[in-house]
Amino acid sequence: MIRKYIDEAEREACDRTGNSGTIIGGGLVLVGFGIVLAMGTGNPLAAIFAVIVLALAGLAWMGVTAPPLRVDPLRILAPMGGPGNLPAGYLVHPLAWRAGMPEFLRGVPERRLRIAVDLCRRHPGAVTDLLKMVERSERWVAEWQPGRDFSPAGRDAEVVIFANRLIEHQLRNVPVG
């Protein structure tokens, strides 16, 4: 399904670099040049031929030097609600990373993302739900369970233990379907 949305977004990518104004401006200049050339030489057929050759050369140059069309990665999965509404297991799926997951996770701290990656295969909700649960777990551990190990790895381990308890509780008590 994600591959279908990626292919569709790449097909529908449009040029937003402003080249249409350049083409119109170049066309007006060429028309003016053609009129001046036709009047100056007295041969309208040669003027039309020169304008056509110059227009084709200009279009070819624009086509060769144009940057590749870019797809807005956050818009790829918009019909599905965006990358945050994918199931939590898609946090580590390669196609989800091609479809806007890095842009969606841009503001998430690295330690929270590491913990979410550890828990994503077991969490029954969406990516957004998983990230919120990890954030709540971090806050709870910081406020209510100071623990003995104050190293970053020790804190992360305590957060993972508490988050696993939340996942187990959710899997046991929340009805499926």
Image (cartoon, grey):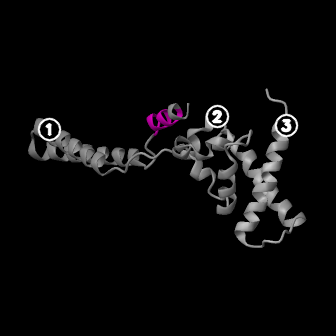
Category of crowding for the residue at label 2, using alpha-carbon neighbours closer than 10 angstroms: few (below 14), some (14–19), many (at least 20): some
* Residue highlighted by disc 1: 49
What is the distance, in whole Å, between disc 3 and disc 1 at their CAs? 78 Å
The residue under the point 69% across, 56% down is 115
SS at circle 3: helix
Q: Name which of mark 1 and mark 2 comes first in the sequence.
A: 1
The C terminus lies in which quarter of the figure? top right
Query: Residue 12: x and y, percent?
Result: 47, 35
Q: Which of 102 and 177 is in front in this view?
A: 177
Q: In this view, does 10 lie to the left or right of 35?
A: right
- Which residue does the image show at 77% across and 51% down from the upper left? 132
Q: Residue furthest right?
A: 144
- Magenta-drawn stretch, dominant element (helix, strand or loop): helix
Mark 2 and mark 3 lie on one chain; the one further toward the N terminus is 2
Q: How far is the residue under mark 1 from the one under mark 2?
A: 52 Å
Residue 47 in magenta stretch: no
- Name the kind of residue labelled 2 in the image: Met
Q: What residue type is labelled 3?
A: Arg
Q: Give the range drawn in magenta.
A: 5-13
Residue identifier under label 3: 172
Where in the figure is residue 154, as x and y percent of width and height?
A: 74, 67
> Is residue 32 shown to the viewer in this render?
no
User: How many C-alpha atoms fall within 10 Å of the one at disc 1: few (<14), some, or many (≥20)?
Assistant: few
| Helix, strand or loop under label 1 | helix
Q: Is mark 2 on a helix, strand or loop?
A: helix
CB under 8 Å between discs 1 and 2:
no
Q: Are marks 3 and 1 in contact (CB under 8 Å)?
A: no
**Residue bearing the label numbered 2:** 80
